[in-house]
Amino acid sequence: MIKRYLMPVVLILSLFINVGVIASVVSRAAGGFFDADTIQHGHTALASHLGLDKGQLSQWRSNEQHFLRDLKTSWDIIRNNRELMIREIFSDNPDIAEIEALRDEIAEQQSRQQRVVIDQLMRERKILNQDQRSMLEDLLINQYPLASVEQMMIREE
């Protein structure tokens, strides 16, 4: 009986490590990302790096405000569902169906985030000239990608 109950909990904890922890770390890191000073600094640094002219910068900022609002809303939903999932996992009588439903909601929200990011990149692509697109492409490709906790642990060994 215990083994049968333990396996789903172990699988869910593994999911928690892969999804919840990463979402938490990123959302905490992004928390500062959403304040006005950080956004302005990011715009200025990237605009300078890409060499945006005033017209491009105006369009860029206009698009970015909507994008950041959508992304922040999505992170808030993930953070909330993650907390609910953790509380359910460690409750006296964990409801595996509820945990699975919360996991599904987190996965759906992450998929939505990917669509939002792709849409934003497509809008940015239209603003930039070919050289600027190449610079942004290189910057994005060379960013250190988010890694799962397991991948980070493997690297430390």
Image: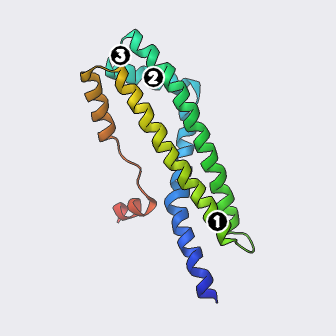
Residue 89 pos. (x, y %): 66, 68
Measured in 3D between alpha carbons, the distance from the residue under mark 1 to the one under mark 2, in whole angstroms, is 39 Å
Around disc 1, counting alpha carbons within 10 Å, would you say few (fewer than 14), some (14 to 19), or many (20 or more)? many
Choose between 103 and 135: the one closer to the eye: 103
**Rendering coords of residue 140 (x, y %):** 33, 37
Residue 95, image x, y percentages: 70, 71
Question: What is the distance, in whole Å, between disc 1 and disc 3 at their CAs?
Answer: 46 Å
Q: Earlier in the sequence, mark 3 or mark 2?
A: 2
- Residue holding disc 1: 99
Residue on which the image places disc 3: 52
Q: Quadrant of residue 56?
A: top left
Q: Going 42% across and 64% down the picture, which residue do you hit?
A: 150
| Residue at far bottom of view | 1
**SS of the residue at dot 3?**
loop
Q: Quadrant location of residue 132? A: top left
**Residue ID for mark 2:** 43
Marks 1 and 2 close (CB-CB < 8 Å): no
Three-letter code for the amino acid on which mark 2 is drawn: His
